[in-house]
Amino acid sequence: MTASTESDPVLDILGDITKIFGSLFDQMDWAEEEIARAITTNPAEADTLYHSFSLLTPTHERMSREFVFRPHCREILNRVVNGADTRPGTAVEVCCACSEVSTIAPMRSAAAGLYARMWAAAFPDARVFGERQLHHEALEGSTIDDLEADARRRLAVKDRTLGTIECAGRHHGEIVQCKYAGA
């Protein structure tokens, strides 16, 4: 009997499903960890942060990477804590858009400055623009402000809101005294 070089379609499908769900479960874990971290630093907002999980969905394929997804979650959770609008694009979402644009055409100074500003906001420990960011800011600061506002508006996710929170008085299966219980 000779070994077949053809792949088994069922095994291929199962492999694809495992890969998709594995990435999805990783993102869910990262979101839960970011919520736990936010609760640690903002215990007064614990109930609201717990119920913010639905806001932490990836909007770009690059968010399958932990390095990219976590700061996206942090920015949204920070908005929740501060009572800010959660719909506008995050710094990570703007970076993803800038990355795509940069593969199509050269970026002008203000656009490169926007990319650098958003990168610094999203990934402060991974400084890749260095001194160039300061130069872009000095030359194009107000234009970058306008581009940032426009990009965040265009990248807004209209249904990324908490809405009315309903809680059965259980968080992760544990009975809790949630301020939204019975609401």
Image (cartoon, rainbow, N blue to C red):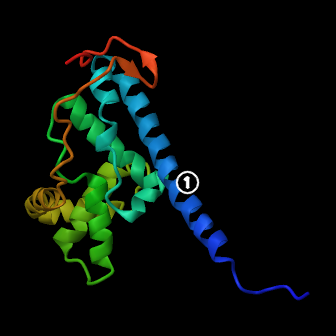
Q: Within the image, what quadrant is residue 46 found in?
A: top left
- Please determine whether, in this image, residue 50 is positioned above or below residue 144: above
- Please determine whether, in this image, residue 177 is positioned above or below residue 110: above
Q: Within the image, what quadrant is residue 109 found in?
A: bottom left
Name which residue lies at 23% across and 16% down.
182
- To which residue does mark 1 refer? 22
Q: Within the image, what quadrant is residue 38 found in?
A: top left
In percent of width and height, residue 20 lies at 51, 60
Name which residue lies at 24% across and 29% down.
81
Q: Nearer the viewer, residue 107 or 79?
A: 79
**In-image side of 82 versus 171 (left or right):** left
**In-image side of 27 versus 106 (left or right):** right
Name which residue lies at 66% across and 70% down.
11
In percent of width and height, residue 2 lies at 88, 88
Mark 1 nearby-residue class (10 Å; few <14, some 14–19, many ≥20): few
Q: Nearer the viewer, residue 79 or 141?
A: 79
In percent of width and height, residue 85 lies at 14, 41
Task: Assign the C terminus to one quadrant of the image.
Answer: top left
What amino acid does circle 1 point to? Gly
Name which residue lies at 26% across and 84% down.
105
